[in-house]
Amino acid sequence: MNLSTVAPNWRAATQAIQQSERVLIASHIHPDGDAIGSMLALGLYLWQQGKDVDLAVDGGLPNHLSFLEGSAAISDMPKPGNWDLFISVDSSDEARTGKSGVMGRERAARVLNIDHHTTNTQFGDVQLVIPTAVSTTEIIYLWLQEMNAHFTQPIAQALLTGLTTDTQGYRTDNVTAETLAIAKHLMELGASLSLIFQQTLNTRSYASVLLWQRVMPAIQLQDGVIYTRIRHVDWQESGIAPNQDGGLVNYLLQVNEAKIAALFSEISAGEIKIEFRSVSGYDVAQIASSLGGGGHQQASGTTLHCSIEEAIDQVIPLLRAEAESGNT
Ligand SMILES: [Mn+2]
């Protein structure tokens, strides 16, 4: 089934919120701009409607997204009690929703799954899954339009944050004139694009530069595949939390000779997180899926349980094969 040909079930999703008073909104572990932007845009709208809304995501709010209005309400754990509806945003599958998602599914009467990953497993009772959307906030924008919602400036700012960060600043090849039309509308509603760039894509910590200094010497380029690794000791000695690497994998893909970039990151002993990026025409979603992960054609990831050397030995041949056969 080609999901992009299935009309989104706006009516079922709208009924699900109309029939709910208590709502939990949660997103994926290691939340990004689209995860937090989606949670806040929907949360702000539902508060407007007088609903009782709980916002929770494993790991809590990343510091750099605290500029978004309403973000102080995001906690790292759902409140006690039950909900009429659990809304999962930007998570391709149940495992990605973390502990918050486990509680959401256990303690909510219904589950609404809103996402744009091609690998979405269609979990939940109602789905708004649109793989052609550049971000989950784009889907929420379309849904709010469908409901004739009042777009406040904070809602517009949250929506534009997801649109901007998931497209790496409107640079991915899924960006269309329609994407820019939505961005234009959100700016007309008062959202600041420069503030989003300043707080997200155009910023990095000095600690992340120290981390890059440590891992740059290990960069390798083989047959169009560029990669490096961050050992646990690198995280520790540069003094930053895992997943705050400052976009190293995106930087690797900027190398002219690279078709595919990979970053192997030792989160803890025997737990290797791998991020993949590819240029247009090369598919890293399938490779991530085959390794138990998921994502988009040009940006995906997975976690393997082995040593960092074993992960590199297992994964690099798959990437080299894709770099050789892709772009067909
Ligand atoms: Mn997203």
Image (spheres, rainbow, N blue to C red):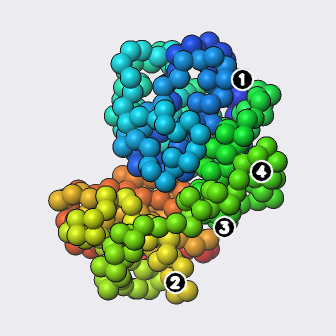
Instruction: Report how far apart the C-alphas of labels 4 and 2 lie in the structure.
Output: 33 Å
Where does the N terminus fall, quadrant-wise? top right
> 107 or 259: nearer the eye?
107
Relative to 139, residue 245 above or below? below
Q: Nearer the viewer, mark 1 or mark 3?
A: 3
Instruction: Report how far apart the C-alphas of labels 1 and 2 lie in the structure.
Output: 46 Å
Instruction: Kindly identify which residue carries mark 3.
Output: 171
Q: Which mark is residue 11?
A: 1
Q: Nearer the viewer, mark 3 or mark 4?
A: 4
Secondary element at tag 1? helix
Secondary element at tag 4? helix
> 48 or 38: nearer the eye?
48
Q: Which mark is residue 271?
A: none
Quarter of the view holding residue 328:
bottom right
Disc on the earlier residue, 2 or 3: 3
Identify which residue is drawn at 32% across, 86% down: 217
